[in-house]
Image: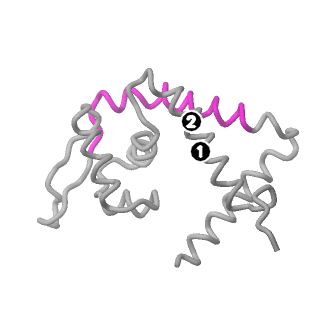
Amino acid sequence: MDFDKTRSAGYLANHLARLFAQHLAAGIAPLGLAPAQFMALLELWREDGLTQAELCARLDVEQATMAATLGRMARDGLIERRAHPSDRRAQTVHLTDRARALETPATTVAQAVNQQALSALPEVHRQPFVASLHRITEEMRRRRP
């Protein structure tokens, strides 16, 4: 049996994710942001002061990838690292005023990208589609290799 990428949920989800990232990147580039930075900022806007390990767990990325992203964010004046209050080996990641000021414009871009993509579906199918993505994501997390 041949593999048919047009019928593969994994292939299509990956392709869709790349397209979302391309559109998001184009929209947030004028703000001085990259998609990986935006993902970390989403978590920090929700809860400032996370550790690198907490960000890795929430975003399902490797430590080395997150370390590089946070390094660029610190260089760009988006975050600052502070000593963890109870773990001398860890640091907490905190937003700068510059990063806080980017929340509204960056999330507005992301909302527009989502609306553009979902416009391909009739209104009645949009929420069930997003709910299905949540269920599938949680199932894949639960069954990590």
- On screen, residue 101 above or below 130: above
Q: Which residue is mark 2?
A: 22
Which quadrant: the N terminus?
bottom right
Q: Is residue 99 left or right of residue 27?
A: left
Give residue 44's position: percent from left, percent from top: 38, 46
Q: Which residue is at the far left?
A: 88
Where residue 120 sits in the image (x, y, percent)? 81, 36
Secondary structure category for the residue under label 1: helix
Q: Residue at x 84, y 40 (%)?
A: 121
State yes or no: discs 1 and 2 in contact (Cβ < 8 Å).
Answer: yes
Secondary structure type for disc 2: helix
Tell me the number on the disc at residue 72. none
The answer to whether residue 101 is magenta is yes
Q: Quadrant of residue 63?
A: bottom left
C-alpha span from label 1 to label 2:
6 Å
Residue at (69, 65) in percent of width and height:
135
Q: Main secondary structure of the magenta part?
A: helix
In the foreground, 46 or 121: 121
Relative to 142, does residue 71 appear above or below in the rendering? Answer: above
In the image: residue 11, left or right of residue 94? right
Which residue in the protein does label 1 denote? 18
Chain part drawn in magenta = 94-117
Which residue is farthest front? Answer: 2
Identify the amino acid type marked 1: Arg
Query: What is the quadrant of residue 10 in the picture?
Result: bottom right
Q: Residue at x 53, y 33 (%)?
A: 107
Count of marks placed on residues? 2
Is 133 positioned to the left or the right of 69 in the image?
right
